[in-house]
Amino acid sequence: MKPNEMRNLSTEELHEQVREKKRELMDLRFQASIGQLAQNHRIRETKRTIARLLTVLREKQAAE
């Protein structure tokens, strides 16, 4: 999801996306720890997506 698409979401939707991505990150970390994760770059991508979501969320909160 691109930042422009994220800006079109409501704050509730952004919170839900952050929760989903954090769950996904936790699952990826578990997979990596037991050696099942073949695509290690997904951890970095997920972290960056979480950071983008939180940035957009803070922008919206600051605008209010």
Image (cartoon, helix red, strand yellow):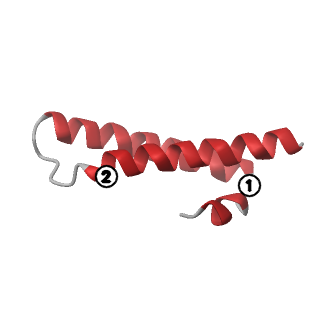
Which residue lies at the image location 12% right of the left edge and 46% below the top edge?
36
Which residue lies at the image location 65% right of the left edge and 43% below the top edge?
55
Residue nearest the observer in this picture, 61 or 41:
41
Which residue lies at the image location 27% right of the left edge and 37% below the top edge?
29
Which residue lies at the image location 57% right of the left edge and 64% below the top edge?
2
The residue pinned by badge 2 equals 42
Q: Residues within 10 Å of mark 1 (few under 14, many from 20)?
A: few
Q: Position of residue 46 (x, y in %)?
A: 41, 48
- The amino acid beneath tag 1 is Ser
Q: Quadrant of the C terminus?
A: top right
**First reached walking from the N terminus: tag 2 or tag 1:** 1
Which element type, helix, strand or loop, lies under badge 1? loop
Q: Position of residue 39 (x, y in %)?
A: 21, 54
Check if mark 2's residue and mark 1's residue have beta carbons within 8 Å. Answer: no
Instruction: Give the label on residue 30, or none.
Output: none
Left or right: residue 10 compared with residue 20: right
Residue nearest the observer in this picture, 34 or 45:
45
Which element type, helix, strand or loop, lies under badge 2? helix
The residue pinned by badge 1 equals 10
- The amino acid beneath tag 2 is Arg
Q: Give above or below for 56 relative to 33.
A: below
Q: Give above or below for 10 relative to 60.
A: below
